[in-house]
Image (cartoon, rainbow, N blue to C red):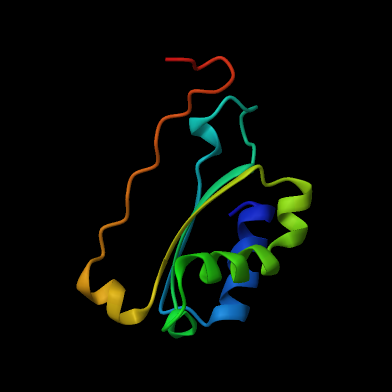
Amino acid sequence: MKPVESQIRAKLSAAFQPIHLDVINESHMHSVPPGSESHFKVVLVSADFVGKRQVQRHQSIYAKLADELEASVHALALHTYSPEEWLANQAVPDSPQCLGGSKHG
């Protein structure tokens, strides 16, 4: 596991005690140098999200990852669920193909 991915995983695990956590480095799908850690998809299931709107959930994650977002993380796709939401539907949307840089389609 790479340093930024590991750091994101550790911070989110400590802050939200997730029931399920995926931290997926999607940098390879974008116009960045090989080995980059700049684009991530996070799937996070936590009891902390019960009764919170998506925007509140996302704001709490942004606050925990402020250093990473300031430094190296360019994009963060968040898919957040309460345990009940996750049990009802575990379908996580696929990330769209990058259209930036040299990959215009």
Residue 90 x, y percent position in the rendering: 26, 65
Quadrant position of residue 67 = bottom right
Q: Residue at x 58, y 54 (%)?
A: 1
Q: Residue at x 34, y 80 (%)?
A: 83
Q: Is residue 26 above or below residue 62?
A: above
Q: Nearer the viewer, residue 21 or 60?
A: 60
Q: Nearer the viewer, residue 20 or 2?
A: 20
Q: Report the number of discs.
A: 0
Residue at the extreme left: 88
The C terminus is located in which quarter? top left
Q: Is residue 21 above or below residue 17?
A: above
Residue 52 x, y percent position in the rendering: 46, 78
Left or right? Give the position of 7 relative to 87. right
Q: Residue at x 56, y 14 (%)?
A: 102
Residue 45 x, y percent position in the rendering: 41, 73
Q: Is residue 90 above or below residue 97?
A: below
Q: Residue at x 63, y 62 (%)?
A: 8
